[in-house]
């Protein structure tokens, strides 16, 4: 496939990961989650806005009995993490003694996941794991054990497949990385 270049706001992006590869990696994660959580009925917590496409495609491929809920929090402004996680909004379910799987679009600094895990662990779940579409291991600023990673990437700014640049680009089927 020939890479495509697009412009979002003031930046150019080029195709980085095609939809077919994304789906193949999500299918592998779903198979692993099915195996690990057989008979446990986990609660998936999809972190909005970015994880909506990942969550939808993952849950279509998970075959075990499960529930899904959506929460909001943020530590981003423009292309930089602020380092401050806002309060979890929208968590109505009681997670005490539940197996929880947090669904993230990307883990880079780890600020968001670290803050969320602290808040969730105060509610005494049976277990908490993280499943992420993308991970930037070189950017981590917190010791995190992310069990389910569809793909590790270098420290490039990426958009598409749920990820945005100042509000746009989430609807792109492929993932693009910044060129300029």
Image (spheres, rainbow, N blue to C red):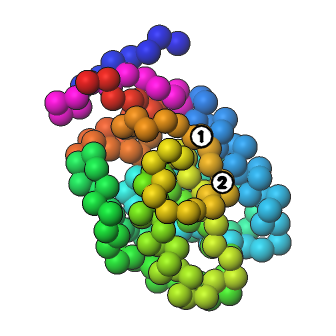
Q: Residue furthest left?
A: 10
Q: Where is the C terminus found, in terms of image quarters?
A: top left
Q: Which mark is residue 121?
A: none
Q: Tell me what residue is drawn at x 47 percent, y 26 percent.
A: 16
Q: Which region shows up in magenta? A: 8-19
Q: Tell me what residue is drawn at x 53 percent, y 68 percent.
A: 45
> At which x and y percent is residue 53?
48, 48
Q: Is 148 one of the magenta-colored residues? A: no
Whole-Å distance between the Cαs marked 1 and 2?
A: 9 Å
Q: Which mark is residue 151?
A: 1
User: Do we see residue 46 in this rendering?
Assistant: no
Instruction: Indicate left or right for 145 with 64 as reference.
Output: left
Q: Residues within 10 Å of mark 1 (few under 14, many from 20)?
A: some
Q: Is 17 one of the magenta-colored residues? A: yes
Quarter of image, res 124: bottom right
The residue singled out by tag 2 in the image is 148
> At which x and y percent is residue 64?
76, 63
> At which x and y percent is residue 14?
37, 22
Tell how many labels.
2
> At which x and y percent is residue 103?
54, 60
User: Do we see residue 153 in this rendering?
Assistant: yes
């Amino acid at each position: 496939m020939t890479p495509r270049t697009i412009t979002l706001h003031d930046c150019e992006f080029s195709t980085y990961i095609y939809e077919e590869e994304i789906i193949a990696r999500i299918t592998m994660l779903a198979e692993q989650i099915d195996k690990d959580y057989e008979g446990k009925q986990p609660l998936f917590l999809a972190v909005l806005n970015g994880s909506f496409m990942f969550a939808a495609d993952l849950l279509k491929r998970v075959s075990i009995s499960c529930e899904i809920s959506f929460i909001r929090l943020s530590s981003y402004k423009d292309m930089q993490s602020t380092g401050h996680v806002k309060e979890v909004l929208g968590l109505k379910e009681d997670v005490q003694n539940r197996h929880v799987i947090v669904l993230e679009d990307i883990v880079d600094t780890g600020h968001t996941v670290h803050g969320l895990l602290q808040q969730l662990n105060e509610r005494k779940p049976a277990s908490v794991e993280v499943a992420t579409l993308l991970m930037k291991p070189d950017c981590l600023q917190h010791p995190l054990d992310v069990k389910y990673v569809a793909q590790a990437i270098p420290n490039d700014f990426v958009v598409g497949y749920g990820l945005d640049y100042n509000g746009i680009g989430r609807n792109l089927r492929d993932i693009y990385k910044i060129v300029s």
